Image (tube, grey):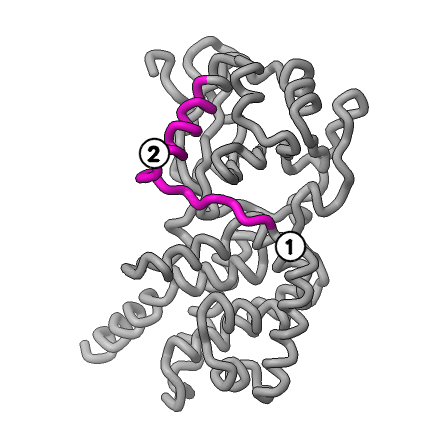
């Protein structure tokens, strides 16, 4: 009985750290599916090695050490996840072609509840949200793996340099040097600041309500009025992306006209407003999944529309229904 109780206690202690470790691994790897695999591997390794845990550091620090090593091992293959705008130039709508790339190419979205710890400090919450934005995540991918780990541990999780040095088995000077190089690289990537999802922000709510009305009504004039002049539209797993009113509207009125009659259901992804995008079902009975649409908002207008089309992956992940009934 005592042994069973001990195991249950250990399971409970490990599980308390799963969510924050998932957020850390997600920032490292750019994929929630890979991050959850990494965390599960971390938990298994910790369980097997618990009898060798000497307690010189906290259990949390020890788990981060294991998780970091798991992520660094996974990153040895050299794959760097990206957004379409990291790989190609914007395409004029007249030349637009849909070319899919393998799943491992793409930076993937994540539900906030899977990667952000529950914190009561609004400032801490803002930092957590800011550092899972798609643009920030894409910028992180430009860093070598160890620099990525240093920057996340120091700048996002606010670890001391000495703690990071101990975790990585290196010196404080080495950590500080890696952090300086990571900051310089991140400054060159210059991820644009965008507004976090805020259901209490009446201005943002009005903008999103107007977007839903314009998109569901397929009113291109109303839709254009909500977009920045250099707004972007991307559609992973396709490497095509469009920039500007004319090309976005041209796409929606051409190939994208299959979106007429769509329904949008609000959700949140990567700290940003998002929609589950449903097409009218072919059998005429309700609506079926088409895309997870992650919105980037800046200054009261929409800066970017990121439509992730692999709905078989994203809708279950976000606990979204796989069909909307015809009666709404």
Q: Is residue 1 above or below residue 228?
A: below
Count residues near mark 1 (Cα–Cα under 10 Å), then give few for <14, some for 14-19, many for 20+. Answer: few
Helix, strand or loop at label 2? It is: helix
Query: Closest to the observer: 12 or 194?
Result: 194
Q: Residue furthest right?
A: 95
The x, y position of residue 134, in whole percent, is 56, 48
Q: Residue under circle 2?
A: 202
| Quadrant of the frame with the N terminus | bottom left
Task: Say how many tags the image has.
Answer: 2
Q: Earlier in the sequence, mark 2 or mark 1?
A: 1
The x, y position of residue 99, in whole percent, is 75, 33
The x, y position of residue 143, in whole percent, is 67, 64
Residue located 51% across and 32% down the image: 301
* Quadrant in which residue 141 is drawn: bottom right
Residue 260 magenta-highlighted: no
Residue located 46% across and 9% down the image: 284
Task: Answer with left or right where residue 73 lies relative to residue 122.
Answer: right
Q: Residue under circle 1?
A: 190
Helix, strand or loop at label 1? It is: loop
Count residues near mark 2 (Cα–Cα under 10 Å), then give few for <14, some for 14-19, many for 20+. Answer: few
Query: What residue range appears in magenta?
Result: 192-213
> In this rendering, does residue 306 appear at all?
no
| Quadrant of the frame with the C terminus | top left
* Quadrant in which residue 200 is drawn: top left
Mark 2 vs 1: CB contact within 8 A? no
> Marks 2/1: CA distance?
29 Å
């Amino acid at each position: 009985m005592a042994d069973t109780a001990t195991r249950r206690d250990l399971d409970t202690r490990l599980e308390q750290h799963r969510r924050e470790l998932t957020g850390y691994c997600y920032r490292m790897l750019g994929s929630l599916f890979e991050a959850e695999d990494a965390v599960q591997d971390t938990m298994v390794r910790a369980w097997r090695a618990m009898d060798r845990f000497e307690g010189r550091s906290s259990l949390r620090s020890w788990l981060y050490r294991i998780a970091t090593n798991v992520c660094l091992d996974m990153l040895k293959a050299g794959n760097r996840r990206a957004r379409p705008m990291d790989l190609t130039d914007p395409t004029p709508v007249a030349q637009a072609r849909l070319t899919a790339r393998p799943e491992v190419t793409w930076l993937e979205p994540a539900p906030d509840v899977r990667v952000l710890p529950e914190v009561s400090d609004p400032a801490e919450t803002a930092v957590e949200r800011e550092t899972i934005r798609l643009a920030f995540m894409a910028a992180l991918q430009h860093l070598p793996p160890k620099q990525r780990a240093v920057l996340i541990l120091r700048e996002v999780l606010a670890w001391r340099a000495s703690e990071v040095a101990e975790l990585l088995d290196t010196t404080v000077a080495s950590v500080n040097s890696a952090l300086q190089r990571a900051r310089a690289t991140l400054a060159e990537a210059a991820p644009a600041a965008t507004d976090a999802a805020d259901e209490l922000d009446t201005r943002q709510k009005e903008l999103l309500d107007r977007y839903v009305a314009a998109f569901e009504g397929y009113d291109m004039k109303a839709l254009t009025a909500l977009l920045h002049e250099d707004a972007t539209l991307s559609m992973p797993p396709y490497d095509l992306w469009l920039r500007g009113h004319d090309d976005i509207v041209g796409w929606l009125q051409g190939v994208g006209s299959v979106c007429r009659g769509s329904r949008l259901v609000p959700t949140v992804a990567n700290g940003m407003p998002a929609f589950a995008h449903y097409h009218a079902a072919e059998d005429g009975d309700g609506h079926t999944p088409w895309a997870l649409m992650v919105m980037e908002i800046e200054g009261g207008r929409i800066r970017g529309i990121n439509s992730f089309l692999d709905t078989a992956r994203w809708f279950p992940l976000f606990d979204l229904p796989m069909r909307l009934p015809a009666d709404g």
